[in-house]
Amino acid sequence: MSDNIGSAKAKEETKEQTRGGRGKKRSAPKKTSQPSEPSLNMAELRELANLVDEHGFTDFEFENANIRVRLSKNPAPQFIQAAQSYAPAPSISGAPQATQTRTETKTETTIAEIATDEDLYKITSPIVGTFYRSPSPDKEPYVKEGSNVSPDTIVCIVEAMKLMNEIEAEVSGEVVKIYVENGQPVEYGQPLFGIRK
Amino acid sequence: MSDNIGSAKAKEETKEQTRGGRGKKRSAPKKTSQPSEPSLNMAELRELANLVDEHGFTDFEFENANIRVRLSKNPAPQFIQAAQSYAPAPSISGAPQATQTRTETKTETTIAEIATDEDLYKITSPIVGTFYRSPSPDKEPYVKEGSNVSPDTIVCIVEAMKLMNEIEAEVSGEVVKIYVENGQPVEYGQPLFGIRK
Amino acid sequence: MKKREIRKILIANRGEIACRIIWTCKEMGIRTVAVHSEADKEALHVRYADEAVCIGAPPSAQSYLNIPAIISAAEITNVDAIHPGYGFLAESQTFAQVCEDCNIIFIGPKPNVIGMMGDKVEARRTMQAAGVPILPGSPDPIEDIDVALKLVKEIGFPVIIKAAAGGGGRGMRIVRQEEDLAAQLEMASTEALAAFKNGSVYIERYIERPRHIEIQVLADEHGNCIHLGERECSIQRRHQKLLEEAPSPVITPEQREKMGAVAVKACKEIGYSSAGTFEFLLDEDGSFYFMEMNTRIQVEHPVTEMVTLADIVRNQIRIAEGEDLGYAQEDVQIVGHSIECRINAEDPVKFTPSPGKITVFNIPGGPGVRVDTAVYPGYVVPPFYDSMIAKLIVHARTRELAIARMKRALEMMVVEGIKTTIPLHLKIMNDEKFQKGDFSTKFMEEFSYNG
Amino acid sequence: MKKREIRKILIANRGEIACRIIWTCKEMGIRTVAVHSEADKEALHVRYADEAVCIGAPPSAQSYLNIPAIISAAEITNVDAIHPGYGFLAESQTFAQVCEDCNIIFIGPKPNVIGMMGDKVEARRTMQAAGVPILPGSPDPIEDIDVALKLVKEIGFPVIIKAAAGGGGRGMRIVRQEEDLAAQLEMASTEALAAFKNGSVYIERYIERPRHIEIQVLADEHGNCIHLGERECSIQRRHQKLLEEAPSPVITPEQREKMGAVAVKACKEIGYSSAGTFEFLLDEDGSFYFMEMNTRIQVEHPVTEMVTLADIVRNQIRIAEGEDLGYAQEDVQIVGHSIECRINAEDPVKFTPSPGKITVFNIPGGPGVRVDTAVYPGYVVPPFYDSMIAKLIVHARTRELAIARMKRALEMMVVEGIKTTIPLHLKIMNDEKFQKGDFSTKFMEEFSYNG
């Protein structure tokens, strides 16, 4: 599980850098028609990333007059990747007989989903606590998928130490995703809502 | 120290490949006026990655006026590289206070040299023992640099357990290099002579 | 008999001690929850715990010292108890009290005992009342030279004048004869005033070459208390311990019994329960004086574990469950000799921190070698926390063999990518005075790295 | 008093035991020479020794069993002594003799003693003469049914008929009552003739559920000899030990004293010097019978080291230097309980070897855990040699705590890239009969991996 998260992230950063590269290129004099296009296009970069990954490299840098590419990975991701969210820590593949029963798998799938919602703004939890979508069990949720929010819209409550903390959206936009179910525990920095600005 | 040997060797081999790369370029049709030429295209990068991976390198850097390439892999191999020849085992760079005095550094430089003599046939020692170039101290050496040998030419003696073992060339050719000094201990498989066939 | 069962523990700490606690929890069949800052997402304690909760940003104040975040994490994961480790909130009376108020077992002594021992003046007073020897001197500021003269007649020379508000050596003056007292007192007061805007000073017996000796105790809720012998912690640099041993090369069985008995008696009088440590200064004559009591597990607890085969963390948990200690003083045997070297991510000469990525990490194995660490190849030492990355502990039949073993283990421990104190420890192991056991807390001041 | 000083040792072995010997040599300030085959160029023993010599091609016969190559390597590196480890040449009388002839100290007993203990019939005879209990039976082949009947009347049922030339279970027959004896004898003989072209069979008392208990001894050249208690080695699969313990859960202090005294007496009578092991079968009544003596260090020696704090390799070297043993039987104390699990590169169910590259290798640390290994991340397990890649050893106050600790350590030991026996050991640790100590050498036959 952690591996998935790890590689999802790695891919994201790769894309990030790719985007940067393209940006730089765009500002350079236009000579895109030339077949010998001195830089790499997206397809080539994709191939490059595959190539580097396939060979198990953990660092790749490339630079010429026009571009500079750098790819890097954590060298021992399988072993050292740790849980990144409030979810049971992943079991060690080499120790299949772990005595712990790992029952609380609630947020596991969500994490992978969240990683793919790259263009959404994430409202994250500023504190550790329990997530509630409505002010009290018999009330309507503050927001639903499709709701429009402005920066001061209250989107949920995170209860910590018996205190109800109202969380504001802090951006304007449309609620596209709700990552956490009502009543579920959340940790610091955990994405709660995905907002399309 | 092992790191030195390791990296010395790595650099040398890298140069080898660099040279290969340049050679290839030189043999290619001249289109140096094109701006794209000084860089590497995708096919070349692919080849490069294969090459580096195939050889098990963990670090590769290349830079010239136009481009700079760097590939690297899990850093741990530096630690796992072990002595490859009869030379005192290298000290661990992380443990600078090793109590052992490592005096017998005789073959160290030779190892790096030998690695570069790629096209030479190597006569190696079939046994562990002491290397003698002549049948007795007051006699002439069996062969010298420049001597021509045939398969049954005796090239040296390796003494083991008080027995004098005469070593035959097993190939025809010219003695180009003598890697071991008279009276020096040799291990199994250690190169003794470099023969140009 | 357990009064209450602990089935799940939140570890309010990080690094090797968090892993150390997880190891024992696993052995006891207790589930664990790791809390971590954003900087520690890939830390080993997060990796090995059954559950993990991110509690805040990298700075300690926002994460490992953030009481509401930790209590919230304990609540959402439904733990029975919190183990505070050492440092961070381990000696916070407030934190222990909040745990109690939230019905979470705090694995340590009662909040009021933590508070009592956390206040230097109160601790001194309490210990004195409990019959623990205290360094002779004036707990209160010295008003004038006459008071000072009277005092030094009682306690004898040399004495040290210290700024009441002070610290870090400023305002400190050592006086070896009566005729210097008045002048030094005035200078110290002037210095203190300049440095701390408070000219108050006090006087204490000065020990030229003290040793730092501490006694490990275990006490349960039912009034049972034993000690596990002493640790020798004199090898320090700026009051930071560098390496520790058990037993001390200078403590005789009689001295051990005497110091242990004093500590055990004091524990019983203050109603102490859990593991704890009495720190003493030992003078050249073998007299010892209370410095402070640490109401938590200590970094150097493994040397005691090695020579007694006790698991101190297990005892802390059992005691927190209300169990009886289960063994008596005569069950404690000191077998062999143990040394611990703290491996820090620091320049071995200048002691400047050296955070960064560890590229190679090889742990020594074999007989009598223990490594407590949360580090692995590829781990990045964050700049936010303590620089200790591992504890290398050895055990052998004699001190001489333990030193030889430690040298071997240090040589075989490979850390690349950052600087560490490994070369310094090797130099100390090769030092003749260290080998003879002939040293005091001044050892590092007199020690030359390059000499 | 040393008779001769050893300053440099060649280790005629590989893998963890080569590293194990290097560790002690480093602690003693003795230089080391590693020998290695072409397949072991990157092995850790090569890495950690002061010098290394390649002695031949990968197959053992051409390298680690190649006496001329090893002696030549010893000569060109000018060593004082050779440590043979276990396996390979460790019990070769020839090799020990060649060393002696070449003026190289062989770290082990005298060549003739190795030879004597290597010959099953002679060992049995010698031990019987030295007062060691021997399994009742006929050392010589049984000629006819009358001889057999007379014999079984003496030794009682059940008995086992074995092929004199045999091995591997063929020609073996268990007889539980007199009326079956004649028929079984004939069948066994026919089977033996078919299998080994030799119909000779002999008869021995058969123990239904024996335990394999062995006694570790240390003897010097001056007639001093002590034992370090027993090891419990009953958990075996096809006569290969899987895990070992010290002490045995069924041996009482009286039984230990009795078995130890027998072993010590025998050592003195045969003029044994160095470390050695007496292997005994223990029957259900507590009677014990000599099986064989191993005249070398054993794989499972660490469990004895953990509970006695003795360094057995150090003792071997000291004895080889002609030193006095230096301690008496009453100095030996058994403290706590130790278990060793052999981690093999094998399928945990089928036991098929699993050589290859180890991609991830994480060693557990913390209290009471020792790892003896020559493996590191990236190491390639060659297909040429024994499949053992590591020994995981724990030590705790009681057997119950040691089992809990071993479980924790096994869970935290991560080996990826190859299959290992770690999951099997975890199943054994969780087995109720194992936990109760209620087992015999039949344990693995009755053990179900998936049950």
Image (spheres, coloured by chain):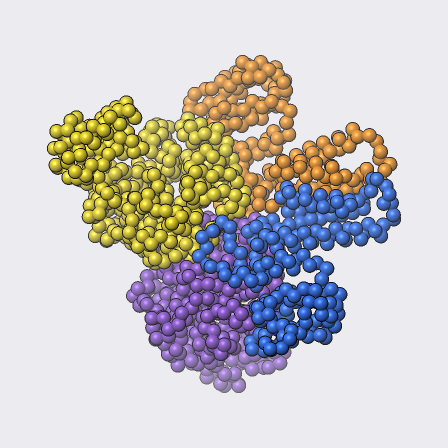
Chain colours: A blue, B orange, C purple, D yellow
Q: Is residue C258 left or right of residue A91?
A: left
x 77%, y 53%: residue: A20
- Which one is in front, A49 or A117? A117
Picture quarter with the N terminus of chain C: bottom left
Point 67% across, 69% down: residue:
A144
Identify the image quadrant of residue D195: top left
Residue C306 is left or right of residue D210, and the answer is: right
Query: Hey, which quadrant is residue D90 in on the image?
Result: top left
Q: Taking C377 as reference, is C336 left or right?
A: left
Q: Position of residue D16 (x, y in %)?
A: 43, 42
Residue closest to the eye, B174 or D255:
D255
Residue A127 can be seen in this image: yes
Taking the spot 70% from the left edge, 71% from the top edge, the residue there is A169
Q: Position of residue C220 (x, y in %)?
A: 37, 72
Residue D443 locus on image (x, y percent): 31, 46
- The residue lying toward the viewer, choosing from D418 and D271, is D418
Residue at the spot 21% in from the left edge and 52% down from the top edge: D254
Between C126 and D207, the one nearer to me in the picture: D207
Whether D292 is drawn above or below C304: the answer is: above
Q: Is residue C317 left or right of residue D168?
A: right
Tell me if residue C387 can be seen. no
In the rendering, at what x and y percent does residue A14 appear? 70, 51
* Number of numbered callouts drawn: 0
